[in-house]
Image (cartoon, rainbow, N blue to C red):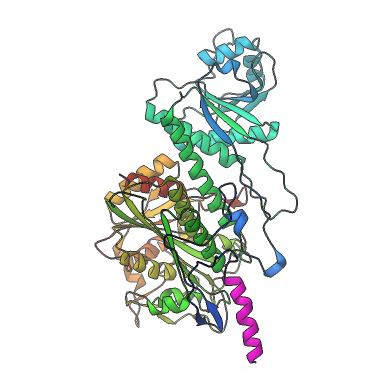
Amino acid sequence: MAATVVSLATSLTAAVVPSSFSSSSSFVFTKLWSAPCLRITFSVSPFSYSRGGGKLMAHSLARATLGLTQPANIDAPKIAISAKEIDVAEWKGDILAVGVTEKDMTKDDSKRFENSLLKKLDAKLGGHLSEASSEEDFTGKPGQSLVLRLPGLGSKRIGLIGLGQSATNTYAFRNFGEAIAAAAKTAQACNVGIVLASTGSTANESKLNTASAIASGTVLGTYEDNRYKSDSKKPVLKSVDILGFGTGPELEKKLKYAEDVSSAIIFGKELVNSPANVLTPAVLAEEATKIASTYSDVLSATILNAEQCKELKMGSYLGVAAASANPPHFIHLCYKPPSGPIKAKLALVGKGLTFDSGGYNIKTGPGCCIELMKFDMGGSAAVLGAAKAIGQVKPPGVEVHFIVAACENMISGTGMRPGDILTASNGKTIEVNNTDAEGRLTLADALVYACNQGAEKIIDLATLTGACVVALGPSIAGVFTPSDELANEVFAAAEASGEKLWRMPMEESYWESMKSGVADMVNTGGRQGGAITAALFLKQFVDEKVQWMHIDIAGPVWNEKKRTATGFGIQTLVEWVQQHSS
């Protein structure tokens, strides 16, 4: 028996301890489930980490044991994005992509374009562009595209991409960029020039945001997560020229920002896409520490094991983790700017269930989506993706804490049962009337921890309830907050990011359904208003002096049509942090 225990401990150590730690790393081992556990604390000199192409995930996933699955080392698309001010008719490349609204496609009595740019291009093409658009019934509606190979321009092909009746927001222009990426894939184009048929008298700030959204959409549209496919094609697109938006350091800075945030979104997508037999809580913690290592000038990392969480009295979180053979890892990254005073302290908390079976209230039946429960750590992916972007952008004047209580919700003889009572780190007791309402139990202790860091404002993101998906559908996240000020800030950030949010009520009278006869509360109420009662539950673990918001991303975390993660939330979080930067 003793020999068996030693063997088990050794094998688990290999799974928990990343191979990339240097001799300068600090280790604190304790006993948990007969296996050594690890605390990692970074200060100025973090452990060494080999990194390529600005990517983390594709190069750093730990060795998988179940199914012998290992992700391939595939670099994210490296696309050179630049702004140029040249005659679009003379631009040389594979595709000149022109964004057109339905109004831009208006033609005169002779069936020629009225729009000045389209008229100029059509003249160079001998009228074939207007003729082809009529024959193909291209009207500029969103989702429409028409790519033609015609002589007469500097480019090999010209593409018309529909923007709809008008394009005035980030969401529309990011979709435009994704449509360009799709057209480039079909044509196997290496380089693309992008121009809008109408820019009008757009303000400079609006032009910067538009160029940034188009660039981001093009990069994200080009990317495909092929790490788990035996045969995959590399993207062909290598360069994108943004035309007609001017040039200069201000625009270059905005395009660099778009590149940084896009790489963070890709990282977040890869986290969510990774299966639970590969992305365990230990591996998620390893990914977090590698972010801190890569941006060690501004980020530090602390990873707490179960014993340390027990010392902090995190009974709610540990109750969820108790059934799994994969130990929990509590992740805390802290961003501090390289110089200058701190004017705001913020915290971002993400739900980190790397797999959710439902526990003893196991997920069964049609629509339970148990096969997709790898995405139950979508909140943590948003938070860690934001950490990666913030590490690159380095906004001054703001301190940010990134917090994830990572674990699995499984079934075993050591797991929590319906009817058990858990005690959270703020002393409140919870009667578990449904083990499948586990995310809020992990978030409870994470929110208490965030308050203890001195955060003045906290946002948590979680794939928390199916009720929110029923209410808002698959594309819109539900926002719950008692603070109008925080709501205004986040909705402004979402407007800039192009992500869709909708504010939901915090109906206090619904708390009646959350009362327990033997504890302070139960962890679920009735079916009605389930997303609201979940938010009211989380509120019990936030200090009254702290402005707090809960964002339920259960719908938009996943694109069912493409069967892939979306990276939702990352850009809004980065924009919100930027708002607080001096």
Residue 558 locus on image (x, y percent)? 55, 53
Q: Is residue 10 magenta?
A: yes
Residue 371 locus on image (x, y percent)? 62, 63
Residue that appears at 30% across and 49% down? 340
Q: Is residue 448 left or right of residue 141?
A: left
Compared to residue 93, the image places residue 543 above or below, namely below
Residue 250 locus on image (x, y percent)? 41, 31
Q: Foreground residue, 105 or 327?
A: 327
Q: Is residue 169 visible?
A: no
Q: Residue furthest front?
A: 23
Q: Residue furthest right?
A: 231
Q: Is residue 523 magenta?
A: no
Residue that appears at 51% across and 40% down? 259
Q: Foreground residue, 145 or 403?
A: 403
Q: Quadrant of the rendered structure where residue 309 is?
A: bottom left
Total count of labels: 0
Compared to residue 398, the image places residue 525 above or below, namely below
Q: Main secondary structure of the magenta part?
A: helix
Residue 423 locus on image (x, y percent)? 37, 79
Residue that appears at 47% across and 58% down? 292
Q: Is residue 113 left or right of residue 459?
A: right
Per the rendered image, the range of residues in magenta is 2-18
Compared to residue 111, the image places residue 366 above or below, namely below
Q: Foreground residue, 357 or 383?
A: 383
Q: Residue furthest bottom?
A: 1
* The C terminus lies in quadrant: top left
